[in-house]
Amino acid sequence: MITLFLNSKKIIPDLYVNTIYDIPYAKLYADGYRLILTDLDNTLISYKQTDPTEELMNWKKEVEGIGFEIIIVSNSKKNRVEYFADILGLKFVKFAKKPLKIGLKKAIKLGKRKYDRKEVLEIGDQLMTDIFGSKRMNLFTILVKAIDRKTEILSTKINRKIEKKMLIKAKKKHLELYNKNLKKYEEDCND
């Protein structure tokens, strides 16, 4: 099984929050972060949404106002990634193949300038793709609660089953980190 080969510490995010709106962007900027790589589906919007919300448009304006550059990094092959990115005025990488590094590296290269990895953070709703892929690149990771799990596609549902096994492994091997950054997430998933 795939979980035997994964380092359970690499699925533990640096921060867990309910939504993108709960992230302390000003503090992260003060800490030296400048580029936000963000997942799209169930991170910024649900799978069923067809257009960005006004709240999302305001979020983008606020975060860029602090000084961040934002790039969407999605595993989706669908044109909706480009559609949302265009409306938001953001660069994007679709079919990023997370947790592989290729899409994340491509996204960082799309930046307005050359970013050191210490300046880059990733926001996502999945441990097995967003967090694991970004941890493999030593990026700061922020896990958000999925917006609407009922709308998830098959590949995401499979990832969630693997994730459950990895949560058990992470709790067993890294209890202090698990309690700090994953316990609330697991509780939220079981609600």
Image (tube, rainbow, N blue to C red):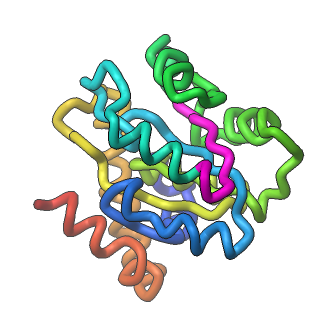
- Residue at 61% x, 30% y is 90
Q: In the displayed orientation, state which residue is furthest to the bottom.
A: 176
**Within the magenta stretch, is there residue 165?**
no
The total number of labels drawn is 0
Task: Tell me if 130 is positioned left or right of 136 in this view.
Answer: left
Left or right of 18: which side holds 125? right
Any part of residue 33 in sight: yes
Relative height, residue 110 to residue 25 (above, below): above
Q: Name the foreground residue: 169 vs 184.
A: 184
Residue drawn at the location 63% of the way across and 53% of the way down:
134
In x, y percent, where is residue 82? 54, 17
Q: Residue at the far right: name it.
A: 114
- Residue 62 percent coordinates (x, y): 51, 52
Q: Nearer the viewer, residue 104 or 67?
A: 67
In the displayed structure, 26 sits above or below 4; it is: below
Q: Residue at x 52, y 44 (%)?
A: 61
Q: State which region is magenta.
A: 64-75
Name the residue furthest left. Answer: 191
Q: Judge whether residue 96 can be spotted in this image.
A: no
Q: Position of residue 40 (x, y in %)?
A: 45, 35
**64 w.r.t. 152: above or below:** below
| x, y percent for residue 19 | 34, 56
Compare residues 82 and 141 and report the one nearer the observer: 82
The C terminus, quarter of image: bottom left
Residue plotted at (38% across, 64% down)? 22
